[in-house]
Image (tube, helix red, strand yellow):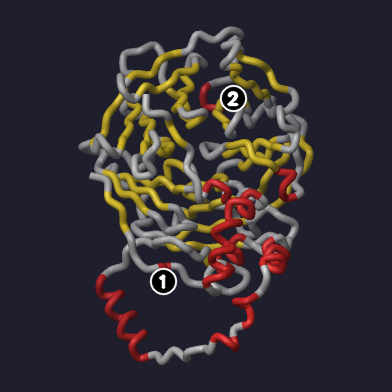
Amino acid sequence: MEMRVRGGADRYHLRPQFLQALPTLGTAPKIEKKRKLKRSSRKKQRITPIIPAKSRPWADLPKELLHIFSKSDSLSVADFLSFGKVCRSWRLFYKETKGQFMASRPPLVIYISTRAKKSCRFYEITTSPNSYQTKLPYFARNFCIGFSNGYLIMEDLLTNVWLINPVTGHQLNYPRLFEARNFLYCPDRAVFASIGDSQDNYLLAVLSPVYNKLMFFVSRVNQWQQFSYKGKTWSIGDIVVFGGRIYALTSEYQIGVLSVKTREVILLNLKGTPQLSGIRNVRFVASKNQLLIVDFPPAAYNLEVYTIDLLKMEWVKVNRLRDERQAIFLGDRMSSRLSNAANWGGESNCVYHLPFMDNTCYIYSLNGEILGSFPIMRQEAAPKMNGWFFPDQCFSIENVRDE
């Protein structure tokens, strides 16, 4: 059964300037009872001075001045989240402007170390990069199988699945996918969305290549359902949420749509299907209004981008993005997406590629020509998983239509 976990925001603590914590304004994961009792006893011993309202002039600052603060180039994501905790007037301003502010920030690179037990790190890709760390529960010996709609999707050795939004602290727990798991490597991929008009009805889809199944869990049904492609001539290589539906990319380069009601993947009859380099090199990339497929074999550096024209039902090769302010942010295994790079002064109409097990981001033209590179972190990368995390998705979830 799906459970929502609520608790105090004291799970997240500020670190030194070189490694800030990502504070939350929502609910944080639950804490063990012993730790709660210790902290409550400490709080009782402290005497918090009451600051008179007259000596708090920051609470009466005009909105025009708050707008100037919030648009400062030096204001990081962590700073803005702390900004909303100062007082009631600042908190109201934060709620009104959080979507606009997060959309103006570049994607964060998320690194989950193989030694990580309770935390992961986020890196900004600006000229003066900031680094954040956020604590997460039940992190050791878990696999990250997706970054979707602002949530990290985790799976443990027993195939229990849980989600957490590292900014708001909202957490969802799900039951086991399968009875047993006999391997230490998890190739599963997952996406997350809301379904229908209800904010409390969610859909989680998990692609499991080992079992040849696409599993999905709808809140109101409250159990795992499945589509099995075992015995078919094709397998599923990638899934994505786009335009109110969950799309699947097959090993035969066919595009399918998951029907929640019939528990089937319906293949689309598309014209002009290209001959791609291999299903392992092909990934979905989506934005709110465009679905792309990127074929990028790293050894050959032969990058090709296609869009699916759902009106003409055909594949179309892309030489320039429809919105030239955007760029493709390509993860090696997951979390690829289109994002507006012009909002924060980045390179547009290009591909930001984040290779697996690498501490460098590479920029390519849509034809595969390398345009530049920059380091993400100083130390050698040895992550359990790395990918892109999009701050503008932290407060809104894409909606899947209730067919």
Mark nearest the camera among 2 and 1 is 1
Q: Give the residue displayed 69% in from the left and 63% down from the top.
A: 67
* SS category of the residue bearing label 2: strand
* Element class at badge 1: helix
Q: Please indicate whether residue 367 sits to the left or right of residue 11 in the image.
A: right
- Which numbered marker is on residue 10? 1
**Residue sitting nearer the eye, 121 or 141:** 121
Q: Is residue 315 above or below residue 238?
A: above
Camera-nearest residue between 109 and 45:
45
The residue shown at (37%, 68%) is 8
| Residue 64 visible in rendering | yes
| Position of residue 32 in the picture relative to residue 21 (left or right) | left
Q: Earlier in the sequence, mark 2 or mark 1?
A: 1
Quickly name the residue at label 2.
Answer: 293
361 to the left or right of 155: right
Q: Nearer the viewer, residue 230 or 126?
A: 126
What distance separates the C-alpha of mark 2 from that of mark 1? 41 Å
Residue 300 percent location from the top left of the image: 67, 26
Residue 20 seen in the figure = no
Q: Amino acid at mark 1?
A: Asp
Give the crowd class for mark 2: few <14, some 14-19, many >=20 residues within 10 Å: many
Tag count:
2
Q: Quadrant of residue 11?
A: bottom left
Position of residue 197 measured from the top left corner of the image (x, y, whole percent)? 39, 37
**Residue 272 in the image: above or below residue 6:** above
Tell me which corner region of the image, top left, top right, bottom left or bottom right, holds residue 75.
bottom right
**As shown in the figure, which amino acid type bears the numbered disc 2?**
Ile
**Residue 138: x %, y % from top left:** 34, 57
Q: Quadrant of the C terminus?
A: top left
Rendered-image quadrant of the N terminus: top left
